[in-house]
Amino acid sequence: MMFKRTNIEDQLYRLRAKQLTEEDLLDQVKAIISRDDQKDIQVLETLNNGSSAISNDFNIDLLQTGNIYHLDQIKEICINYRLRFLDSKYFKGELPYEAISKIKQLEKDHETSLKGFKIIAPSKLFKLENADDPLLFAPLGNGYYYLIHKWGNDLNPFRRLLMLPFKNFENLVFLILLVSFAATLLVPNGLFTNNMGAAEFWMIFFFMFKSVAAVTIYYGFAAGKNFNTAIWNSKYFNA
């Protein structure tokens, strides 16, 4: 005698049919999805309009130590790569759903509502007031921040080198001196005198230095530029 094999899916379906009608099941699923959608909206509103909270009620035992960073470390990275560290409400880029999901999961695991979100990103990704690689943080308190999510593309490998002149005043002066010296070397011998000696060379160098410095200062004032040390946490475009 051959017995029919048991189809577990079929058995599961029959058991559910005894307990719930299809209408009741759909109503329950809709309610779950609706609650989840409301949570998404709440998280987005906090990200877009949230206040600058200084801490959150995290369960320290559930935190991943590899995601904890101090403000001094964040500041150094922002200065080196000319990035800004600002409240998430100033961010004008698109927040990936994965970031929202991670926030919801953290809130569930830690049984709290997170606030005070901050983002590291280039200036162009922020809605700055007029006075390629975002990272989302939440404050832990006492100057520490917890990295929640990173998205987008990595920074140009030469970005740190390219932004070095804008790091501080000393670096900019050194670059101006270097450019002036190179420009002086390019001046053809005999252009101003038949035989250019040391005195004539340094006189031309001084002229080049003044010219390059003048152009740099004009560009800096015209474009409202400032050094990395001054803008890393400023919400103003021309800080």
Image (cartoon, grey):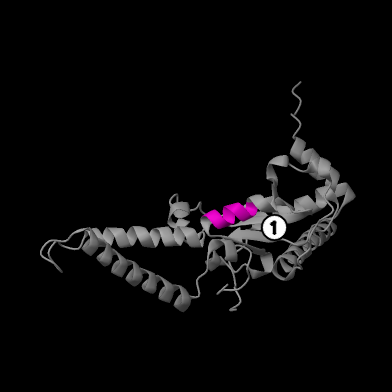
Q: Residue at x 69, y 45 (%)?
A: 67
Q: Is residue 13 left or right of residue 191?
A: right
Q: Quadrant of residue 26?
A: bottom right
Q: How many marks?
A: 1
Q: Position of residue 94 (x, y in %)?
A: 59, 64
Residue 231 lies within the magenta run: no
The residue that label 1 is drawn on is 100
Where's the C terminus, which quadrant?
Answer: bottom right
**Front-lying residue, 112 or 157:** 157
Where's the N terminus, which quadrant?
Answer: top right
Q: Quadrant of residue 32?
A: bottom right
**Front-lying residue, 47 or 129:** 129
> Label 1 sits on what residue type?
Ile
**Front-lying residue, 133 or 235:** 235
Q: Residue furthest top?
A: 1
**Front-lying residue, 76 or 190:** 190
Of helix, strand and loop, which mostly describes the magenta segment? helix
Q: Residue furthest left?
A: 194
Q: Is residue 149 left or right of residue 220?
A: right
Q: Residue at x 44, y 61 (%)?
A: 172
**Secondary structure beneath label 1:** helix
Q: Residue furthest front?
A: 199
- Label 1 crowding class (10 Å Cα cut-off): few <14, some 14-19, many 20+? some
Q: Quadrant of residue 86?
A: bottom right
Q: Position of residue 169 (x, y in %)?
A: 50, 62
Q: Is residue 8 left or right of residue 19?
A: left
Q: Which stretch is magenta?
A: 74-80
Q: Position of residue 23 (x, y in %)?
A: 82, 60
Q: Residue furthest right?
A: 19
